[in-house]
Image (spheres, rainbow, N blue to C red):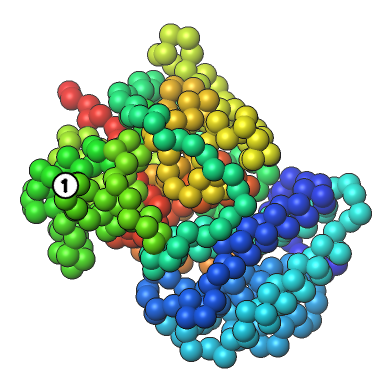
Amino acid sequence: MGSLTVPPTQRVSAQHLADMLTATRRRTKALCADLTGQRSLGPRLAIVNPPLWEVGHVGFFHDHFALHTLYGLPEYQAPQAQTLYDSSKIPHEARWTLPLPDWAGTWAYLDQVLAAMLTRLPDGGLASEAQSYVYQLTTLHEAMHAEAFLYTRQTLGYPAPSTPTPALDGAGAGGLPGDAQIPGGNHELGSDASVPFRFDNEKQPHEVTVAPFAISRAPVTNAEYAAFVDAGGYQDRRYWDDAGWAWREAAQLEAPVYWRHSNAGWEQRRFAQWLPLAPHEPVVHVSWHEAQAWCRWAGRRLPTEAEWEVAASRVPDRSGQQLLPGKRRYPWGDHMRDDQASNENRCLTNLDEARLGPVDVAALADGDSAPGCRQMLGNIWEWTDSLFAPYPGFVAELYEDYSAPWFAERRRVLRGGSFATSSHLIHNGYRNFFTPDRNDVPAGFRTCAIQTQ
């Protein structure tokens, strides 16, 4: 094994790493199986990658960081892999014109890299610290791209993928009005060493003070958002800041991007299919600008990421006036429960494409946080008001381009994960980050009451 210094990392079992890697690869193949023919590259858009290139990039990421960097193998496992798939060096617009292998050659490359990684794990017992860090880094990177394949399909209007996961029935659960009252106090924001894998932007955990606040028990629903649209909110300049109004005018939007009006009322497009707007599902595929405009109309505000994390992870005392010490890794406790297909786990959260879309906001009550907030993990990503910025003590880690290049872009933090997010990836401290104009991501929002003096 090559000499590699990695951040302090819990050693995990070799079997866990192998299982996570192979399960993620099955997911990638299931989500991309029909992206052939013209779909292999698709249209050239700033918000998507050509699928044939993106799958190859997934393999290259494993190849570069595991086989090349960790194990010191001098050559990549496919000819010209670095010149084809290195996202740090290949401009986005060039990815449609590269001499890429066909699908058979691309999958053969990924299979070869996977086999080489698996054979280098120990036969039982704990993997090394370096293996534990690198294998989780590369596998979670693949999991992020698997989610991106889903919202690429949505963006391009492709049919939903044929995935082997069981359906999660969240229809008919209804709405969940009202706020959870959260006591203020000191909070350690970020992920500590108890989390098996932490990305660099989750570090270092640091103490912040959060004032008492009230946050909605559930995200804003389609019906609640439609009231804003029907009231002329997209035409009323008062609800939009300068950047948001300019974005809305340029996009020529009169409603969320995948909505249309029919004789029967609002409809929403899910992949290639138009469906009646489900009133109690959370609004999804709205930008940060749209979330802010709704908040101004409704007299509400977005939570900060610290407030969001407190509502997801902290436990109030019996009086409800103070926060108990410590925090949970997940809203319901400290364990995800690995079998995402079991009935028990499915009643906690909508992750791993348990359903190819959101469920009603009142569904999944067993996954509530201690203060009573529902679906804080899974279903939809949630915009916060916070800029994506480094925490005190931030140090870029092995994948240097993961966080550091984006701090200056005035991206906004999203929390919580969506129906398309991997359960291996998400926890209360995970930070996602996109520019405020992005409405292709499966994101919505929940809101806080504005405190009056």
**Picture layout, residue 175 above or below residue 116:** above
Residue at the far top: name it: 319
Q: Is residue 72 left or right of residue 196?
A: right
Residue under the point 79% across and 81% down: 74
Q: Which residue is mark 1?
A: 229
Residue at the far front: name it: 263
Residue at the far right: name it: 123
Residue under the point 62% across and 29% down: 344
Q: Is residue 88 left or right of residue 285?
A: right
Q: Is residue 111 left or right of residue 397?
A: right
**Visible residue check, residue 379:** yes
Percent position of residue 380, x then y? 42, 45
Figure quadrant of residue 154: bottom left
**Picture layout, residue 66 above or below residue 125:** below
SS class, disc 1: helix
Classify mark 1: residues with Cα within 10 Å, few (<14), some (14-19) or many (20+): some
Q: Nearer the viewer, residue 46 or 172?
A: 172
Q: Nearer the viewer, residue 341 or 58?
A: 341
